Amino acid sequence: MIRYGMAQWQHPAWVNWLYPASLPSAARIGRYSQVFSTVEVGSTFYTKVDDAQLLRWYESVMDGFRFSFKAPQAVTHRLTERPWREVQRDWSVFMESLKALQAKLGPTMLQFPAVYDERALDTMLALCDMWTLSTPLSVEVRHLVYFDKSETETSFLSALSSRGVNRVVMDSRPVFSTEAYCESLMDAQKKKPRVPCHPIATANHPVVRFIGHPDLPRNEPWLNQWAAKLSQWLSEGLTPSVFVHSSDNIAAPTLAAKLDEKVCLLTSNYQSALVLPQSQEQVSLW
């Protein structure tokens, strides 16, 4: 199957669409999990989330749902400036906090910043080697040396593959395909990495982060490419997680549904589990 999700489970523009306005904010994750099968959780990157809160989220979602938590920035973004024993400690504490959630865990993300080049690779891999959970692990890198299609990228991919670790494939091509003519595009182009898109699976649960353009029809060429790649991965027995963003995330669910429609057309015996509530406003965007 393909697990589709967003970078968040609630958005003001999704009220009276993905969930009714009468639904309490705390209950929206449950409604979200009835539509999508995964979510990218960035809050664990920025702060320590209490174990009790993690458990509440866990108990709120459907049994087949999967969380993809981001590792704390103290681990991934201060990797070389802190004592290694402190990084190890924080990584171990984070893994321990996820143990009770393993039945509903998708690929946990180690997201490394663009300042870490090939000199940090051994340390990044050492974190991968510490992974003790039975659930998938994924790695996102942003330094351009890891996209050189030569020795460094080959070594990186080989190292992930030998460990059964998934590469996160970032596709920000759509959001950089035009000049930033609105505030959301300006913000997205400042924050999202502009890296080449190399759709290579290194393990059984490849992770895709697709950053869509707010002019929805403009996304068609890239959605077509991803539909073909996802169909290929399905034929190989892989289980991709696809996290769909847009510059303001308002239409991200619509983009996910459009992508899944394209996968359905290309893949025999594929039954979509993604059905959005009807909304004339969203439909008319295409």
Image: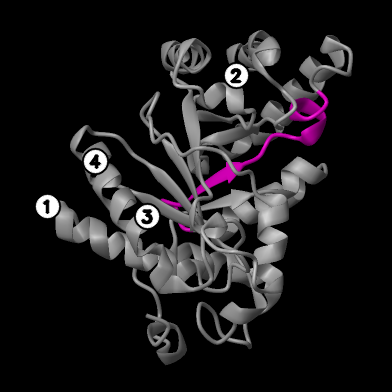
Q: Which of disc 1 and disc 4 is earlier in sequence?
A: 4
Q: Residue furthest front?
A: 179
* Res 277 quadrant in image: bottom left
- Tag 3, which secondary structure? helix
In the image, 8: left or right of 147? right
Q: Nearer the viewer, mark 4 or mark 2?
A: 4
Image depth: mark 3 or mark 1 in front: 3
Q: Earlier in the sequence, mark 4 or mark 2?
A: 2
Relative to 162, 177 lies left or right = right
Residue 273 visible in the picture: no
| The one of 235 and 193 positioned closer to us in this rendering | 193
Dot 4: few (<14), some (14–19), or many (≥20) neighbours within 10 Å? some
Q: Can I make out residue 245 in this image?
A: yes
Q: Which mark is residue 35?
A: none
Residue position for label 1: 269
Say few, some or many: other residues with alpha carbon within 10 Å of mark 1 (under 14 / 14 to 19 / 20 or more).
few
Q: Which residues are magenta?
A: 62-78
Q: Which residue is mark 2?
A: 131
